[in-house]
């Protein structure tokens, strides 16, 4: 897929972090970008800067996602590229103890369900609705009609203490990549997933600089946090390289997460 003005793209979570970096990188190529996010103020501002369109979308709702696609397609036409970056990070042990009484407490199931609902169900909801539109397009070179890029995490493979919910949600995204690629193989739609490591995001920016430096020192090479531009570079390559399909790629500087 050649990324230029003939291509329409949707980026979920495009109002910040990895999604924002990807939206900006795609727009720099001339791609018509629609940003899906809940942060309307920030999303509208970024869309205006890059000449795109903002769609206020809650990825946990079929109706909200459908309305987002309707708005994006009305503005730019049917998307050929969707990048799923919307998600949340949570942490809680399977069993925790009260610091004073040492009384054990089971994991909060509402938090577990929320994490999976946004990260896993939300990703699949967006990709399935997007793919249903992509298959109506005329094929490009190699018979390609579209490409979908999901975001999992290295926690899908080496989750840390307190990451049961998060790892399960991202592990689900990792696991669905190949079967969905196989589901869509005769439709000309490719599906790949990126597994980011320790990335510099707005959440990371709120941490003390010493903490950021300590995290960077853990990474084998290069000894720095990953950036939205690093993510965007890989996402754009996955969009452009038609022969990469059904693949999950770690973007992590060779780190393997320790238990804590």
Image (cartoon, rainbow, N blue to C red):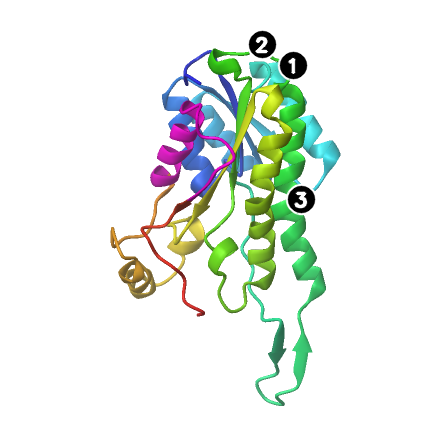
In-front residue for pair 165/186? 186
Image coords of residue 152 (percent x, y): 51, 46
Start and end of the magenta stretch?
229-249
Label 2, on which residue?
138
Q: Disc 3 to disc 2, how far (Cα)? A: 28 Å
Dot 2 crowding, Cα within 10 Å, few <14, some 14–19, many 20+? few
The mark nearer the N terminus, 3 or 1, is 3
Task: Give the SS element for disc 1.
Answer: loop
Image coords of residue 238 (percent x, y): 42, 30
Is residue 51 visible from the viewing direction of this image?
yes
- Which quarter of the picture shows residue 60? top right
- Which quarter of the picture shows residue 2? top left
In-front residue for pair 192/86? 192
Is residue 56 visible from the viewing direction of this image?
no
Image coords of residue 19 (percent x, y): 47, 37
- Confirm or deny contact between disc 3 and disc 2 (CB under 8 A): no
Dot 1 crowding, Cα within 10 Å, few <14, some 14–19, many 20+? few
Magenta stretch encompasses residue 76: no
Indicate the quadrant containing the N terminus: top left, top right, bottom left or bottom right. top left
The circle drawn on residue 121 is: 3
């Amino acid at each position: 897929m050649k990324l230029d003005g003939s291509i329409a793209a949707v980026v979920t979570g495009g109002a910040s972090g990895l999604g924002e970096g990807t939206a900006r990188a795609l727009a720099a190529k001339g791609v018509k970008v629609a940003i899906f996010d809940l942060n309307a103020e920030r999303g509208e501002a970024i869309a205006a800067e890059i000449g795109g369109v903002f769609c206020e979308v809650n990825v946990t709702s079929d109706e909200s996602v459908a309305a987002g696609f309707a708005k994006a397609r009305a503005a730019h036409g049917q998307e050929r590229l969707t990048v799923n970056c919307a998600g949340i990070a949570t942490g809680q042990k399977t069993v925790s103890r009260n610091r004073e009484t040492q009384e054990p407490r089971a994991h909060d199931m509402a938090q577990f369900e929320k994490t999976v609902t946004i990260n896993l169900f939300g990703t699949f909801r967006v990709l399935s609705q997007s793919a249903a539109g992509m298959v109506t397009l005329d094929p490009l070179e190699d018979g390609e009609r579209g490409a979908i890029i999901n975001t999992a995490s290295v926690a899908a493979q080496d989750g840390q203490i307190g990451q049961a919910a998060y790892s399960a949600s991202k592990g689900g995204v990792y696991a669905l990549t190949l079967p969905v690629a196989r589901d869509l193989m005769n439709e000309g739609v490719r599906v790949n997933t990126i597994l980011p490591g320790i990335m510099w995001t707005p959440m990371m920016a709120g941490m003390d600089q010493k903490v950021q430096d300590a995290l960077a020192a853990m990474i084998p090479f290069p000894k720095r946090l990953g950036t939205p531009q690093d993510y965007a570079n890989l996402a754009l390559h996955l969009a452009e390289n038609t022969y990469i399909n059904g693949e999950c790629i770690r973007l992590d500087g060779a780190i393997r997460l320790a238990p804590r």
